[in-house]
Image (cartoon, rainbow, N blue to C red):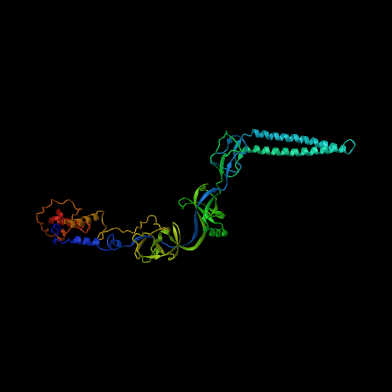
Amino acid sequence: SAQAANSPDGGAPPAGRRAGQAGDAAPGSGRFGRGGADNGPIPVVAVAARYEDVPITVDAVGTIQALNTVTIRSQVDGRLLELDFKDGQDVKRGDVLARIDPVTYQAQYDQAIAKKAQDEAQLANARVDLERYTKLATTEYGSRQQADTQKALVAQLEAQTKVDQGVIDNDLAILGYTTIKSPIDGRTGIRLVDAGNIIHAADATGLVVITQLQPIAMIFNLPQQQLGALNAAMAKAAVAVEALDADNTTVLDKGTIEVVDNQVDQTTGTVKVKATFANSDRHLWPGQFVNVRIFVATLPHAVVVPTAAVQRGPNGPYCYVVNEDGSVKLTLISVGRQDETSAVVKSGLEPPTLVVTTGFARLTDGAHVTMAPADQSGAPAAGAPPATGEATPSDASGQPRGPDGGERRRRGRSQQQSGSAPVDTGAPAPPAAATATDPPPAPAAGTDASASEPAGANPPNEERRRRWRARQQSGAPAATQ
């Protein structure tokens, strides 16, 4: 066969190729084994377990509500002269918002004042007459009946003046309604009517809506199973709550629980809770949906590790513990409360045990590791090399494989299986090929017979060049082809 003709030992596979095959198939070597170039320490990131006071929290979804919302409406009919606010303006209690034409109501007020003055004048005259009639009644020039009649008239006029004062007060109040003022501190919304329109007290829509933003309230529901823990916490101190954004990581504001509703909703099995927030930065807005976290208790002196260190297996959760000799041990643990960043270990670990947080790709019980710096969360420190758990692939000689070394090895195998001589594609173009009928010339003097062996085991570049030159000088078919 062509393979036998090209082999110096008469058909046996070349020694170099046998070595290459052995290097590729040896268990525990190269990419697929644990020996060879991949048998070194596995790069990982490890963090020490620590003691912490862990807050026990309950999460829910709440709706932001304003503590006070007022729809500004006119209390009198008339033409709207002006609006003294801008949309979205912050206003204080007592600030003027709008003015209605007061001419009609001013006239009514003036009329009431005049009516009272008229009645007061009549009252003064009646009192003088009463005094006269009383004196005459004591003599023979007047009667007691006339004095009593005058006394009744004085009382009637006194009552009339009180009625007049009531009319004045009413007209003054109506006149005051022509100037509309803000009843609370808050922010105006978008105005609902423009100046110049005729407005009525019976209008369904008002002029504008004012909403109080500071402080602000949140309403949320909790399962009835959490009611006992919440009431116990409120009996000790004010229960703290946090308003979080949609990603559940950014704290929008902090507040306290104001009140728990006095009954459980039988339809949903939940109880309504109200919390208040200062909202000094105005991150909370009425009608907004936010996540809420309630701090109901604190777990003191708990063992805490990063959540990334906790792995799951058929026997339950476990961690890789780093020993003093640089090896790791698979340790089963019992996990309590856990969130996105940290986990409470109930048993199985004690601080300051080092646990692996990154680099689990090739990690097994007993493997040796090398540790990269990390922060407390278990993430690699800035500037540290990534701990991927993958070693640099290499060939049987212990040298790293080049980008096309694997391709040359596959071509060599393919040619041996097909009966053709291996071709070193990394060599320059050889001279003109010899014919198939020409006998292969003997190796040149001083040339090692092994030089005619094909390079199947991917040796270093210098060795491949030396062998190719030797085959070219000897005229071996592998080189001429």
Query: On screen, 143 above or below 293?
Result: above
Coordinates of residue 26 in the picture (x, y in percent): 25, 63
Quadrant location of the N terminus in the rendered image = bottom left
Work out whether 237 lies above or below 93: below
Location of residue 110 (image quadrant): top right
Horizontal and vertical percent for residue 405? 24, 55
Q: Position of residue 256 (x, y in %)?
A: 55, 54
What residue lies at 54% left-to-right and 58% top-to-bottom?
A: 227
Instruction: Single out the residue that lies furthest toward the front.
Output: 267
29 relative position to 91: left or right? left
Q: Is residue 433 left or right of residue 327?
A: left
Q: Nearer the viewer, residue 474 or 340?
A: 340
Return the residue nearer the eye: 368 or 256: 256
Q: How many marks?
A: 0
Q: Is residue 2 visible?
A: yes
Q: Is residue 466 visible?
A: no
Task: Pinpoint residue 360: horizontal percent, then vertical percent.
Answer: 36, 60
Residue 467 is drawn in which quadrant? bottom left
Q: Residue at x 17, y 50 (%)?
A: 429
